[in-house]
Amino acid sequence: MLVRLLYASRANAPVDEALVASILEQAAAFNAAHGLTGVLCTSSEGNVFLQVLEGGRAVVNELYGRILRDPRHQDVTLLDYAEIGERRFATWRMGIVNLNRINLGTVLRFSETPVLDPFRMSGKAALALLEELMATAAIVSPDGA
């Protein structure tokens, strides 16, 4: 059974290239080995992560448990969890979006402010934002897959 999990969290340290590279390195290996796909959005303003994960229920649940215990995250908040018939983000083992480089109007279409604050967004709005980023080719794959 495939599921999609969407969560937000705040980093315990400033969101910079080194932190994101560390997360992506771990994600690439784990996701490839376990059939997971998804997208990670980062914003240094507020030190925010917004991530969607897709895959088998057991492995997605296991990974979310690891994220909850990961000392790099705080305020981990589940925004949406659903059984799915097919993946929306199948192209990426772990796509990445640096929201500091995105047109503020894109975020503003789905949010109260042009600064990403997924804690004040519905899961539906956050997922719509990710789909918009996918449609506008804002999501890139750091590992070529």
Image: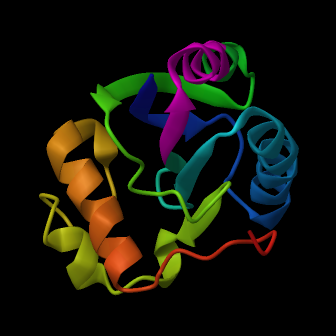
Residue at image location 34% in from the left, 87% down from the top: 103
Quarter assignment of residue 95: bottom right
Magenta residues span 51-65
The mark total stands at: 0
Residue at image location 83% in from the left, 59% down from the top: 21
Residue at image location 31% in from the left, 45% down from the top: 118
Q: Is residue 88 above or below residue 52?
A: below
Is 53 magenta? The answer is: yes
| Percent coordinates x, y for residue 133 in the rendering | 37, 74
| Percent coordinates x, y for residue 114 in the rendering | 24, 70
Is 109 magenta? The answer is: no
Quadrant for the N terminus in the image? top left
| Percent coordinates x, y for residue 106 in the rendering | 25, 78
Please name whichever residue, 62 or 1, is drawn nearer the observer in this view of the structure.
Answer: 1
Residue 94 visible within the image: yes
Q: Main secondary structure of the magenta part?
A: helix
Position of 13 compared to 140: left or right?
A: right
Please name whichever residue, 88 or 20, is drawn nearer the observer in this view of the structure.
Answer: 88
